[in-house]
Image (cartoon, rainbow, N blue to C red):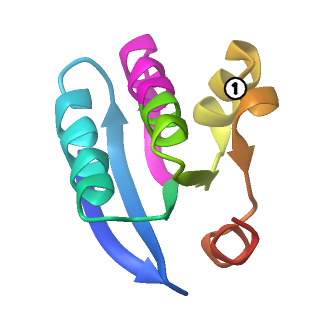
Amino acid sequence: MQITNTQEAGTAVLGVAGSLDATSVADFDAAWKLALDEGAEKLVVDLKGVDYISSAGLRGILLLAKTAKAKSVRVGFTGLAGMVADMFKLSGFLSILAVFPDVKTAAESL
């Protein structure tokens, strides 16, 4: 898995590529925790490069959402496609997480 950390309109953006599963979720957790520790008030997680997500990856996303909410950080997700979009839908995440069509829209909307 590869993770990039950039800024878009004053919003921290984590770009994730590869598989988000039990072997990579620790890296994902470290990346978003660092963004929150650095004072991000808005965080966009761009999943367009993710081709596989397991239940461990979904737990990592849920942990991010809960931690961000406790810290009053607004979080949005973009780039859902294929299997990742299906997993968000099946898990009910589409009804509890903010999902946007692209990073720019998410950054402006959060």
- Residue 78 figure quarter: bottom right
Q: Position of residue 85 (x, y in %)?
A: 68, 35
| Residue 27 versus residue 89 in the image, above or below | below
- Residue 36 figure quarter: bottom left
Q: Position of residue 43 (x, y in %)?
A: 49, 60
Is 21 placed left or right of 83 in the picture?
left
Q: Position of residue 61 (x, y in %)?
A: 46, 31
Pick whichever, 83 or 63, lies toward us.
63
Q: Amino acid at mark 1?
A: Phe
**Dividing the image into 4 quarters, which one contains the C terminus?**
bottom right
Is 99 placed left or right of 6 in the picture?
right
Q: Position of residue 33 (x, y in %)?
A: 26, 45
Residue 85 part of the magenta segment: no
Q: Residues within 10 Å of mark 1 (few under 14, many from 20)?
A: some
| Region in magenta | 48-63
Q: Where does label 1 land, which residue?
A: 93
**x 64%, y 46%: residue:** 80
Pick whichever, 92 or 67, lies toward us.
67
